[in-house]
């Protein structure tokens, strides 16, 4: 019998802040405990980086902060150093020299790596800040240079739904990258087939367009087909799937084994679906139920769909860590 554990997931490459479990490189000489990283390590290739160390700041070091007095600057108040151009220069060169990668996990609230949660000050002498919704300088470069790639911080990774979307996206992108290495239409067709329900749950309209690209009725060069497909892939994975489109995908999948269920079992499924619509249950529970039924009735098509296991089964346990 086919098992959902047999799905082979390509290994994503993720750029991660070095202080998140890799080295004692924070300004205070400490390292941030990040258990999720350790759980991901067997299935992910990490590229760790500390932008602050890379621009020559030591460990430990005097804190730096973001100042916006009309011009956004990176300042080290204790020394008066303006590190703005140094950090911008490093960020540009580092990102330019990166080769293959699928996403970013960055340190929250950091003046270099924070994503949307960093304090921004009106000057470098007071304790009052303008707001705490800024991006660190390195993070700003990431979001500007690679707006379509998944980027998240370690605090956001504690949110089950945000984490699920991040993992889904990086593993989908890694699998596409692996398929593109073959430069074969057959590899793209296989990739598209395995991800049909996942894409259906995101956007039926874009799924149809992606199918047209894969069909390649104009007999375009394979490289061109992959390029066009990637553009839509990034678009379809840009936001978490909405409950309405998820329900449509689940109903489509339900048709593969519904004839084997009793009236009572079908009623129970409809109750599960209604609970999900009303936010009284999660997609995780529905995925497991579908996989159990697909295994019970040996529905190979469903067992091979990434929608039900978008990343390795061993990482599903991380969904309960908060």
Image: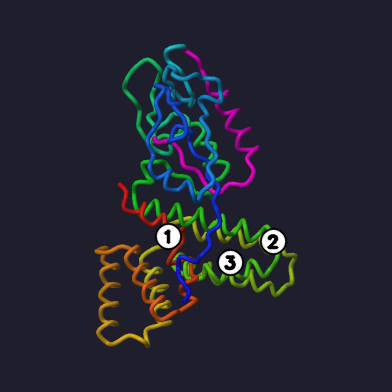
Residue hosting label 2: 182
Q: Identify which residue, 162 or 315, lies in the foreground.
A: 315
The residue positioned 42% from the left and 41% from the top of the image is 153
Q: Quadrant of residue 37?
A: top left
- Label 3, secondary structure: give it: helix
Say whether marks 3 and 1 touch (CB < 8 Å). no
| Precedes in sequence: disc 2 or disc 1 | 2
Q: Identify which residue, 3 or 280, lies in the foreground.
A: 3
- Label 2, secondary structure: give it: loop
Q: Quadrant of residue 220?
A: bottom right
Q: Is residue 91 magenta?
A: yes
Q: Position of residue 65 (x, y in %)?
A: 42, 23
| Precedes in sequence: disc 2 or disc 3 | 2
Q: Position of residue 164 (x, y in %)?
A: 40, 55
Q: Residues within 10 Å of mark 3 (few under 14, many from 20)?
A: some
Q: Position of residue 254 (x, y in %)?
A: 39, 79
Q: Is residue 243 magenta?
A: no
The residue positioned 34% from the left and 46% from the top of the image is 158
- Residue 92 marker: none
Q: Give the colouring mode of the picture.
A: rainbow
The residue positioned 57% from the left and 32% from the top of the image is 91
The residue positioned 65% from the left and 74% from the top of the image is 215
Does 171 sit above or below residue 56? below
Magenta residues, start to end:
80-108
- Residue 191 marker: 3
Q: CA distance from mark 3 to mark 1?
A: 19 Å
Q: Identify which residue, 209 or 249, lies in the foreground.
A: 249
Q: Can you tell which of label 3 and label 1 is closer to the viewer?
A: 1
């Amino acid at each position: 019998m086919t098992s959902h554990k047999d799905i082979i997931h390509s290994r994503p490459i993720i750029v991660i802040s070095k202080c998140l479990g890799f080295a004692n490189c924070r300004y205070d000489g400490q390292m941030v405990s990040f258990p999720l990283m350790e759980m991901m390590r067997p299935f992910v290739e990490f590229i760790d980086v500390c932008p602050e160390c890379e621009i020559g700041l030591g460990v430990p070091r005097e804190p730096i902060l973001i100042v916006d007095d009309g011009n956004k600057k990176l300042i080290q108040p204790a020394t008066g150093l303006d590190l703005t151009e140094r950090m911008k220069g490093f960020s540009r060169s580092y990102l330019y020299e990166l080769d293959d990668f699928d996403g970013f996990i960055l340190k929250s609230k950091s003046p270099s790596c924070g994503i949307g949660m960093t304090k921004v000050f009106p000057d470098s002498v007071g304790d009052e800040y303008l707001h705490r919704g800024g991006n660190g300088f390195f993070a700003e470069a990431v979001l500007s240079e690679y707006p379509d790639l998944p980027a998240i911080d370690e605090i956001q990774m504690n949110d089950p739904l945000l984490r699920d979307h991040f993992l889904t996206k990086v593993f989908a992108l890694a699998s596409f990258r692996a398929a593109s290495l073959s430069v074969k239409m057959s590899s793209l067709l296989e990739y598209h087939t395995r991800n049909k329900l996942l894409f259906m749950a995101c956007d039926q309209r874009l799924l149809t367009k992606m199918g047209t690209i894969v069909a390649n009725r104009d007999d375009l060069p394979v490289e061109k087909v992959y390029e066009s497909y990637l553009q839509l892939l990034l678009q379809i994975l840009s936001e978490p799937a909405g409950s309405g489109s998820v329900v449509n995908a689940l109903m489509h999948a339900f048709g593969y084994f519904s004839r084997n269920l009793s009236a009572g079992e079908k009623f129970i499924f409809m109750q599960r679906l209604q609970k999900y619509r009303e936010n009284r249950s999660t997609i995780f529970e529905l995925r497991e139920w579908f996989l159990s039924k697909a295994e019970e009735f040996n529905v190979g098509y469903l067992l091979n769909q990434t929608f039900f296991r978008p990343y390795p089964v061993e990482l599903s346990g991380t969904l309960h860590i908060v």
